[in-house]
Amino acid sequence: MAKRIAIFPGSFDPFTKGHEDIVLRGATMFDEVIIAIGHNSQKKRYFPIELMIELIGKTFENKPNVRVETYDGLTATFAQEKGANYILRGLRNTTDFEYENAIAQGNRFLNDELETVFLITSPSLAYISSTIIREIHKYDKDVSAFLPYELPSKGE
């Protein structure tokens, strides 16, 4: 039987407790989960990608079936390169569904063996948004309640 490999793609700027929840639940469903940090040339990152790779890696260091990688280009192509037939996505609300459904259809068009699996975000984490976290952090306020790791202080 082929390994069930899922890609969990995103910019993860930053990676939140909501993201962690989806990965932990996905890790029980799939043999392997690849947290795939995409390079988006249209977006300027707030947190350096190298920092996110390190912090996410530490978050899952005791989960041998979870790893972090970066990629350029289309998610469907990256999934194919990794032998993944699943894309794992979290949904907080109906707005997320509308957006993610369109992306899932596009990925399926590019690779008809690629299934998108949606998990509903746990209610206690559904309010967490990377955009809001960046805004709070920008004004030097504590964002630790939203993250599964500790951010280094701005001076580090």
Image (tube, grey):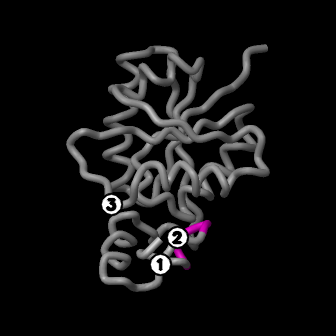
The residue carrying mark 3 is: 46
The residue carrying mark 1 is: 143
Give the alpha-carbon distance from disc 2 to disc 1, as whole Å: 9 Å
Give the alpha-carbon distance from disc 2 to disc 3, as whole Å: 13 Å
Amino acid type at circle 3 is: Tyr
Residue 147 on image: x %, y %: 55, 69
Tell me: residue 65, above or below residue 16: above
Q: Quadrant of residue 102?
A: top left
Tell me: residue 24, above or below residue 100: below
Amino acid type at circle 1 is: Val
Q: Report the mark closest to the observer, 2 or 1.
A: 2
Tell me: residue 24, above or below residue 130: above
Q: Earlier in the sequence, mark 2 or mark 3?
A: 3
The residue carrying mark 2 is: 151
Residue 9 on image: x %, y %: 47, 40
Residue 15 on image: x %, y %: 50, 58
Callout 3 crowding tier (Cα within 10 Å): few <14, some 14–19, many ≥20: few
Magenta region, residue range: 145-149
Q: Earlier in the sequence, mark 2 or mark 1?
A: 1
Name the residue located 61 percent from the left edge and 66 percent from the top edge.
148
Instruction: Please tell me whether mark 3 sits on a helix, a strand or a loop.
Output: loop
Q: Earlier in the sequence, mark 1 or mark 3?
A: 3
Question: Which of 143 and 30 lies nearest the eye of the viewer?
Answer: 143
Q: Label 1 near label 2: C-beta < 8 Å? A: yes
Residue 84 is inside the magenta segment: no
Q: Is residue 93 left or right of residue 148?
A: left
